[in-house]
Amino acid sequence: MPVRMGIAIERLRLKAPFRISGYVFEGFDVVVVTLEQDGHVGRGEAAGAYYLGETAETMRAALEPHRTAIEAGLSRDELGALLPPGGARNAVDCALWELEAARAARPAWRIAGIERPRPLVTTFTLSADDPAVVEEGARRYATAQAIKLKLSGERELDAARLAAVRRARPDVWLGVDANQGYRRDGLDQLIGLLVEHRVSLLEQPLPRGAEADLEGLRSPVPIAADESALSLADVDGLFGRFDVVNIKLDKCGGLTEALEMARRARELGLRVMVGNMISTSLAMAPAFLVGQLCDVVDLDGPTFLVRDREPSVTYRPDGTIWCDEAVWAGGALTPA
């Protein structure tokens, strides 16, 4: 039987503006792909990578020319050859996973060869706000085991934000995300500041394309590649420059390639992290499976939304995330 594909754009409203280096977000548009075949349904959600110019409209435009091929019933491997890494492929790839799970009556984690999922400690993110706002936010995360702070590249403000988090949560695991906001000549001073505040991870301090500037750097704080690790093709080039690979399904094009990236990073001796764009639980669910293979998990996207999907992932009082099979690809989804 042929596959019927639906493509919808949905607006996600944020509880408050979200600030990072160079951007302020007040809402997000996501693409939701639905694949129906023989009474079974598969769904995938993608926000895309904003720093690559992806929008919901560009993702939809990227999918429409391939509607015939997708509706003919292509495989996930064939999809990887049809579409480049990015949000458009991610939405279809995740929909194919859920459709396969429904047809086989087996959850996606079994199909992927992953052990039965367990709750995961996730970071909870603070945007690059005024230090007083940052401190208040850190206090609200009173039971979080891990916090991630967005930096803006403004050295004095970033120092004040770090101090604010440590006043509120002196013992929490703390990571920072520079979102490409620093340059090599300011990195040594930044790392010294991070050591002072007992920071355990530094994400993407330099712009994509400046990876070679990290060669020879001896940082006591592990450095993670985010924008420098878009897809599997980037992973080998990270060795000797980064310590951790941050995998996001919107960057690499879905769960299929994300699993390949995690396994290749392990082969190279790199640590693995899974991250997310601000999205609903429909996007968190496949990333949660990748998280089962990771050292660091950053899957708090739905916590910034006015409203999430139902059923949704659960954020537990102990700072963990749990995703029940009912959320996505549990093996039994049928049309409403």
Image (tube, rainbow, N blue to C red):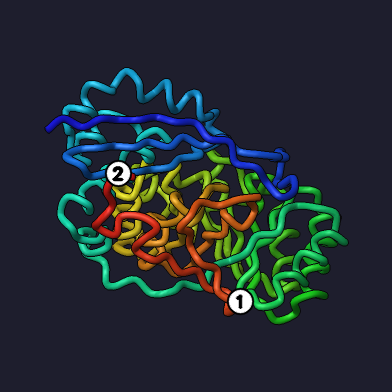
Find residue 224 and report its horizontal and vertical position in percent. Answer: 53, 57
Identity of the residue furthest to the left in this view? 1
Residue tagged by mark 2? 335
| Mark 2 and mark 1: Cα distance apart in space | 38 Å
Question: Which of the pair 55/205 is nearer the observer?
Answer: 55
Indicate the amino acid at tag 1.
Gln
Query: In the shown orientation, is residue 183 left or right of residue 295?
Result: right
Residue 303 tag number: none
Residue count near mark 1 (Cα–Cα under 10 Å), binned few <14, some 14–19, many ≥20: some
> Viewer-nearest of labels 2 and 1?
2
Mark 1 element type: loop
Quadrant for the N terminus in the image: top left
Disc 2 to disc 1: CB gap under 8 Å: no
Find residue 7 and report its horizontal and vertical position in percent. Answer: 39, 29
Residue tagged by mark 1? 145
Question: Which of the pair 214/91 is nearer the observer?
Answer: 91
Q: Residue at x 17, y 33 (%)?
A: 73
Query: In the shown orientation, is residue 10 left or right of residue 230?
Result: right
In the picture shown, does residue 172 fall above or below 331? below
In the picture shown, does residue 134 fall above or below 178? below
Mark 2 element type: loop
Residue 246 can be seen in this image: no
In the picture shown, does residue 221 fall above or below 157? below
Mark 2 or mark 1: whose residue is earlier in sequence: 1
